[in-house]
Structures are given as C-alpha cells and as structure tokens.
Image (cartoon, rainbow, N blue to C red):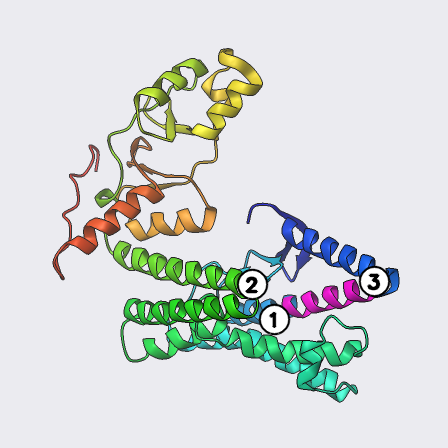
Amino acid sequence: MSWSINIGRIAGTAVRVHITFILFLGWIFFANYVAEGPQAALASLIFLVLLFTCVLAHEFGHIFTARAFGVATPDVTLLPIGGVARLERIPEEPRQELLIAIAGPLVNVAIALLLVLAGARLQAGDLAAMDSTSVSLGDRLAAVNLFLALFNMIPAFPMDGGRVLRALLATRMGYVRATEIAAMIGQGVAFALGFIGLLYNPLLIFIAIFVYLAASGEAHMVAMRAMSRGVPVSSAMMTQYASLAPDAPIEDAVQTLLRTSQSEFPVVDAAGKLVGLLGRNDLIRALKQRGGDARVADVMTTTVPSIGHRQHLEDAFRILQDKSAPAVAVVDTAGRLVGLVTPETIGEMLMLHEALPKGVRLRPWSQPAGA
C-alpha cells in the first residue's frame, strides 16, 4: 500500500504503518495536550498504541489461519480505521474462508477474556468513556476489544462478517453469486451507517463510504476472476500498440504518447523481445529530471512480469493483483512480445462478457505466429 512505512517483520510478514496513522496519533496527542495537559495526552497515546497492537493481533489471527491453508501473507498495514492484512489469495472453499474470517474477531474476544481474568471489568459505559483517563486502561481495552469483535462481524465487506456471510452463502450457491448477495447486503449496511452518521456521528459517514466502495470492489474483483478462469490470455490481450526501442531518445516517446491513447509503452529490442516498459509517469519524470536528451533505456522499468501466450487470463489477472503491475507482457515460445494485458483490457473484457447472453463466451483471437 502506498504512503506506508515498513517498521519491521513479524513471522515473515512485513508490518507497515500508513502515514495517516502516524498523523492520527499526532493529532490525538496534540488535542489531548491542549485540552488536558501532557499527562492526559501521554495516557491517550499509550491507550491508542495498545489498541492498535490489539488490531495487529487481530490481523495476525487471519494471517496465521490463512497460512494453515497455504495462503501466503506478504504484509499487513495499520490505518486509522484498523488493519489490513494482504493475503496472496482468498480461498474459494467456503470452510477455509469462514475459518480465516472468524479468526480475527476470536483473537479480540480472547484478549478481552484475558484482561477480565487479569482484573479488568467489562461495562457498557467503558466504551463510551474510551478517551477518558477516569476509566482504567485495562477496562477500556477489554471493552474496545469486545466492540472490535462485534463490529467486525457486521455482514458487510470489508469486515469479517461480510466474508463469513459469503462463505455461508457459498455452501448453497456459486461463489460469484454469494459474493454479489454479500456485497449488496454490505452496501445496504453502508447506507444505514451513513444515515446514522448524519444524525449522530459524522465519522460513521466516512466508514460508510469505505464499506460501500469495498463491497463494490470485492464484487467486481470476484466477477473478473470468475470471468478470466479457463479463458485463453489471447482473448483479452492488446495486440495493437506502439512500442519503443531502448536506444530511442525520450523525445520519440513523447511523440508516441501524443499520437496514441496508450499510457504504458513496451520497449522491445531488434529481435522483438521485451526489455522494459515505459509508463506515462516515468516519461514525465524523465523529462523533468533529464530533459529530452535521455534515452528510453535509461528511464524504463526493466522488471516487467510476463506470461506465455498459451496460458490463461486468470494467470495474468493474478499477476496484476499480486504484483500491482501496470501491465503483463504476453510472449511467444521464442520470447517475443505478442501482446499486453492491462487492468483496462480485463475490465473491457468483463463488460463484453456481461453483455453476452448467458452461456455464450467470446471467441479468442487468432494465435500469434510461432504458437
């Protein structure tokens, strides 16, 4: 995730802190310092750090359970609204997703129980007094952990309850349909949160927008993944594109950018093999820093993911997701570039697929030479 700082690794997973989280801590400290003095500000800061440690433990509940099913977890990011663990993939077996989803809230329940056994009291009023130093630190942490467990079980993406609901629905219907229903329920919950936020707490409006967008994004992603399964990559690759030579001056790239609608330009050698990729942002940056005399090879990205032209579209889609790559190169058996797959081409493929009558698929384009 962009705008995040890597603060270390725990059990092989990188732990990142988003810059907004650091700003949030700073704002809480400053507000409490002005209102109640340095001692209250420090106490509030300690509470928030412990709270987000509990959130991190929640995310590692998901992570360790996912690893038990062979799902890798590259990193987890702390945000002001909680944590986000990035799983390599979401298992489509309902039982596995169910266990991964409930593992996080169960960690919060376990923390609350441990605090109660250590002497903390669970009272409803402690949650309302979460920012007050008049309530003991243990009481507040116990109350907020129980709240986190209950809040995350709301049946709306991206909360764990949304994934639990999808897993339960998927036992009776297809995974795509289960996602659509869970996403619609999540959007309904988002509208309800937004309405309550208008009446009581504006913060709920922000959460409602986040929930609505996450539910829509989850449904769209699952639909694209289902559409791409078993489809040859040639069905969605872009074959009409402008390419650049590595020794060409950057001015040639500027002219190519102006006369085409491309945002990513493959860089190929004399044999037609891909050696890099030049994006619009890299091009603009090169003009500012080096001027028009720079060569394409000096500013291009050389780490471009590629797949064979006989592979499936789902392989390209997985690479675009996992590596956050702007494009995936499609190469023939000799390593020559024959096409590009971008998020835009997959999105267009999905629109066409949804427009066709049920059961009808688009025909793949003709295989490239050397197939």
Mark 3 is on which residue type? Leu
In the rendered image, which residue does mark 2 sit on?
Answer: 202
Q: Classify the position of the C terminus by image quarter.
A: top left
Label 2 sits on a secondary structure element that is: loop
State the image coordinates of residue 69 (x, y, percent, origin top left).
Answer: 48, 70
Percent across and percent down for residue 298 are: 51, 21
Kindly identify which residue carries mark 3.
42
Looking at the image, is 367 positioned above or below residue 207?
above
Label 1 environment density (alpha carbons within 10 Å; few <14, some 14–19, many ≥20): many
Q: Which mark is residue 58?
A: 1
Mark 1 falls on what kind of element?
helix
Characterize the local packing of mark 3: few (<14), some (14-19) or many (20 or more) Cα atoms within 10 angstroms.
some
> Is residue 50 shown left or right of residue 186?
right
Say which residue appears at 37% left-offset and 28% top-offset: 265
262 on left or right of 191: left
Under mark 2, the amino acid is Pro
Instruction: Considering the whole magenta stretch, tell me its main secondary structure.
Output: helix
Q: Are marks 1 and 3 in contact (CB under 8 Å)?
A: no
Residue 68: mark: none
Q: Is residue 84 above or below residue 371?
A: below
* Rendered image quadrant of residue 94: bottom left
